[in-house]
Image: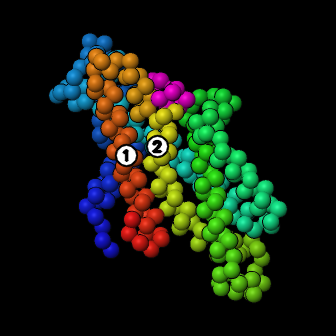
Amino acid sequence: MRIRPGLWCSAAFVAVLVAMAAFPALFTAADPDAADLQATFAPPGGAHWLGTDENGRDLYARIVHGARPSLLIGIGAVALALLGGVAVGVASARLGRLADQVISRSLEIVLSVPWLLLVFLVVAALGPGSGPAVIGLAITSLPGFARVARAETIRLRAAPFVEAARGFGWSGAQVVLRHVLPNTLGPVLALATVSLGAMIVASSSLSFVGLGPQPPTAEWGAMLASSRQTLSVAWWPAVFPGVAITLAVLAVTALGRELHGRVEGRSA
């Protein structure tokens, strides 16, 4: 199996991000929320590797600690969308023509609404924060997972092993749990990996407009938002969080495309 160097780099970077999110103390002992007004906008250097922000907070420490909320929102949204999408897609394919039409039209309605507007509605109902952001992003992503799960369920419905299971007297629920779901998860998980990069961007966008984790929580999108007014004074509070978002999305997307290609039997 041929693995390109870029994929090794992407995998290594994702591993570092996961380690940052799980064990930030391994990477820095500095408090990400500790303000030092005498060190306001200190440039990158020995004392502060990536400089400080408008409150004198260490940017490196905030980026390290910001990996957790940035990744958790994206992973949570993808996981929730995956679970709901698989359930809806399998139900759509197995509950008959009428149910299939109702579910399909409902998914098209969700897809027709701009994702940001839909998240705004969820946040307006539940309030700003990580939880509402996860729910809103999951709702916007659910139709994609549901369509993949529905297509795979329809394809598997006429598979020989499914027909054999029915011949042995298995119930519909047994067939779904033992044969349909395991064979559906491959394409769905590949889509989830590809979607994670988009969810990281979306979660950072929500934080940028104030709908994600609230200050003083260290989160990459929120760090970008707080630095946009002072960009002419200091470039580093905006550049380094933006670089973190960009590299995270590129690494996750590269791995997702490779996984998607291997699920389809080709190299991405």
Amino acid residing under circle 2? Ile
- 143 to the left or right of 73: right
SS class, disc 1 = helix
Name which of mark 2 and mark 1 comes first in the sequence.
2
Q: Residue furthest front?
A: 112
Read off the magenta span. Answer: 207-217
- What residue is pinned by disc 2? 200
Q: Is residue 214 magenta?
A: yes
Residue name at image x 31 percent, y 31 percent: 239
Residue name at image x 64 percent, y 60 percent: 147
Front residue (pair 19, 234): 234
- What main secondary structure does the magenta stretch of the protein show? loop
> In terms of image quadrants, where is residue 259?
bottom left
Residue name at image x 56 percent, y 46 percent: 77
Q: Is residue 185 magenta?
A: no
> In terms of image quadrants, where is residue 154?
bottom right
SS class, disc 2 = helix
**Residue 242's spot in the image, x, y percent?**
35, 35
Say whether marks 2 and 1 touch (CB < 8 Å).
Answer: yes
**Residue 94's spot in the image, x, y percent?**
75, 68
**Residue 255's spot in the image, x, y percent?**
39, 58
Pointer 1 local density, CA inside 10 Å: few below 14, some 14–19, many at least 20: many
Q: Quick check: can you spot residue 197? A: yes
- What residue is pinned by disc 1? 248
Vertical order, 69 against 170 (above or below): above
